[in-house]
Each structure stands twice: as structure tokens, then as C-alpha cells.
Amino acid sequence: MKKSSKTTAKKSPSKLQDGASCRVTGGVHQGKSGTVRDINTSKTGHVTITVVQANGERFKTLAKNVEVLG
């Protein structure tokens, strides 16, 4: 019997860094963009980030829902 292989798409850690421009592509904040701040990894392994928008508004989201720009 052949084992089915599951592949999970992981973000490249080199692209997701403090100060990078990003756009949220999923979740509650979908469509918003801003600057990445405060990257945290929880005990369970989920990576969360704080995004600061141009108007100064901040929100937290999961890194898997974020696309790094340029």
C-alpha cells in the first residue's frame, strides 16, 4: 500500500520579517495591508504577527494569512 504524502505550504521565514510590507489574503482582516511588526510563535507552533496600517491602526493575524509584498 502506498502512503499518501501530505504537504503543507510554509512561508519562507526570510521573507516574513519585521518592517516588511504585507497584504492580508485570508481571515477576518482580508484585504487590509500594512507593515509587519512583532512576530511571535506560540507554544503550538502558530505564527502570529501584528500589522500596522498606514493610518496607525494595528491588528493581529496569523502569518499563514499574510502575503509579503515586494
Image (cartoon, rainbow, N blue to C red):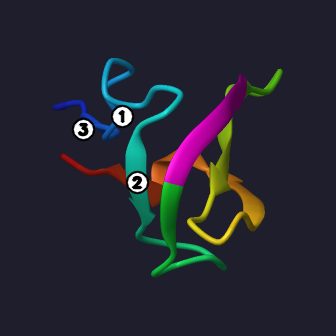
Q: Is residue 20 left or right of residue 2?
A: right
What is the x, y in percent for residue 15? 31, 28
Residue at position x 28%, y 37% in the image: 7
Which quadrant of the figure contains the N terminus?
top left
Quarter of the image where one finds residue 48:
top right
Residues in magenta?
Answer: 35-40
Q: Tell me the amino acid under the disc marked 2.
A: Cys
Name the side, left or right, on which 27 lies relative to 3: right
Residue shown at the point (31%, 40%) measured from the top left: 9
Q: Which mark is residue 10?
A: 1
The residue at the point 53 percent across, 28 percent down is 18
* Residue type marked 3: Ser
Q: Residue 22, labelled with which disc?
A: 2
Q: Which residue is mark 3?
A: 4
Marks 2 and 3: CB-CB under 8 Å?
Answer: no
The residue tagged with tag 3: helix, strand or loop? loop
| Residue 59 horizontal side relative to residue 6, left or right | right
Name the residue nearer the viewer: 41 or 35.
Answer: 35
Q: Nearer the viewer, mark 2 or mark 3?
A: 2
Q: Quadrant of residue 63?
A: top right
Q: From the viewer's perspective, is residue 1 above or below residue 51? A: above
Amino acid bearing label 1: Lys
As measured in the structure, the alpha-carbon distance from the residue carrying label 2 to the one carrying label 3 is 34 Å
Q: Nearer the viewer, residue 54 or 69?
A: 54
